[in-house]
Image (spheres, helix red, strand yellow):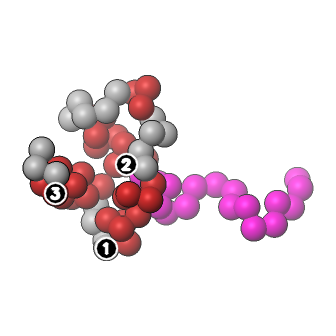
Amino acid sequence: MEDFGDIPIGLTPFDEWMSWLFMVQYRVGFLKLTDMGSLDRDHWQQYYDDGYSPEDAFEEDLTCYGD
């Protein structure tokens, strides 16, 4: 196997968190399956850094925009 230097191989904890966030949004009908990969990572990074669960981050984000 080749050495890819500083390119991470596998999922980071944030990647796993984003996957759960997508599943939460899909489960409630907010996103379609074809939207996989469409979430803005930079937008959600602050919620992750602040220790929100994917469910709590989604709910908090909805209240911020008044949805």
Q: Position of residue 32 (x, y in %)?
A: 34, 27
User: Mark on residue 19?
Assistant: none
From the top left corner, tell me how far across and down residue 58 is, in percent.
24, 52
Whether tag 2 and tag 1 are in contact, CB under 8 A, the answer is no
Q: What residue sits right under mark 3 in the picture?
A: 64
Q: Secondary structure at mark 1?
A: loop
Residue tagged by mark 2? 20
Question: Range of the magenta residues?
Answer: 1-18
Badge 2 marks a residue whose secondary structure is helix
Identify the amino acid type marked 2: Trp
Answer with mark 2 or mark 1, whichever residue precedes in sequence: 2
Q: Does 40 appear above or below 7? A: above
Quarter that holds the C terminus: top left
Q: Residue furthest right?
A: 2
Query: Which residue is painted at 23% across and 30% down in the image?
Result: 29
Residue type at the position of mark 3: Cys
Give the class, few, some or many, for how many residues have Cα within 10 Å of label 3's Cα (few <14, many ≥20): few
Between 63 and 1, the one lying in front of the other is 63
Mark 1 or mark 3: whose residue is earlier in sequence? 1
Is residue 59 among what the camera can see? no
Mark 1 against mark 3, which lies toward the viewer?
A: 3
**Circle 1 is placed at which residue position?**
50
